[in-house]
Amino acid sequence: MDEEGAAGRLHEVGHRMARVLASSGRAPDAARLIAVSKTFDAAAIAPVLAAGQRDFGENRVQEAQGKWPGLRERYPDLTLHLIGPLQSNKTREAVALFDCIHSVDRPKIAESLAAELARTGKAMRLFVQVNTGEEPQKAGIAPAGADAFIARCRDELGLALAGLMCIPPADEPPSPHFALLAKIAARNRLSGLSMGMSGDFEQALMLGATHVRVGSAIFGGR
Ligand SMILES: *Cc1c(COP(=O)(O)O)cnc(C)c1O
């Protein structure tokens, strides 16, 4: 993908977000755009940074370690989001590099994050991933177990949760999944909703998304 193109597409996504937020009666800053830069190198990311984007998402700790420390020296005001599954043996590296983790998806990860945050004193924004489609191959807590898991994270582990995240099944309309995530968040008094990708971020914004994770609509196909 040409680099001028990525900055232009970033602006287009921003306009589309602004339109939906306005027509939904939401504030212009009610949702953040996370530019998902997985598989793209620093040279492809540079024009998007130059265009003013500061929130980026990556799905692998190791891949992110290869490109973001250098970029962060030039752009210290970056916010980095881990949106892919976290292995418990990568918790230390993930806490060191990222500002937000959207994939708190099982007790073992919650425990290792709690220990690492206590050890380092770092404050992080954490999202619990809910497997709204109950897909066996997909990460996340089943909807029926979400309340108990959220309570355990807060009460037993002392984690300050920012919200919930979901990835709807690829072959279903996403809106019922976004609505379910919003409902689980509301009854647990969680304000953050990480939902919506290139193909469905407008629907997610209509249903209350506070963070949309958009990759290919900005960077091009992977
Ligand atoms: C890759 C990815 C995205 C972005 O997907 P696009 O369809 O390219 O916008 C969003 N969320 C997660 C968890 C991803 O892995």
Image (cartoon, rainbow, N blue to C red):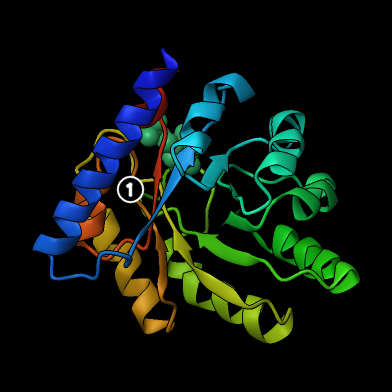
SS at badge 1:
loop
The C terminus - image quarter: top left
The N terminus - image quarter: top left
Q: Residue 155 lies in what quarter of the image?
A: bottom right
Residue 92 visible in the snapshot: yes
Badge 1: few (under 14), some or many (20 or more) residues near its Cα, within 10 Å?
many
**159 sits to left or right of 65:** left
Residue for point 34% across, 61% down: 31
Q: Nearer the viewer, residue 156 or 2?
A: 2
**220 sits to left or right of 89:** left
Residue matched to label 1: 196
Q: Nearer the viewer, residue 127 or 47?
A: 47
Residue 91 in picture, x, y percent from top left: 79, 52
Residue 136 visible in the snapshot: no
Asked if 137 appears above or below 105 in the picture, the reply is above
| Outermost residue toward the top in this view | 2
Type of amino acid at the residue the image marks with label 1: Gly
Q: Quadrant of ligand 1?
A: top left
Residue for point 30% across, 73% down: 183
Residue 142 in picture, x, y percent from top left: 47, 59
Residue 194 in picture, x, y percent from top left: 42, 57
Residue for point 84% across, 46% down: 89
Q: Is mark 1 within 8 Å of ligand 1?
A: no
Residue 100 in picture, x, y percent from top left: 61, 58
**112 sits to left or right of 60:** right
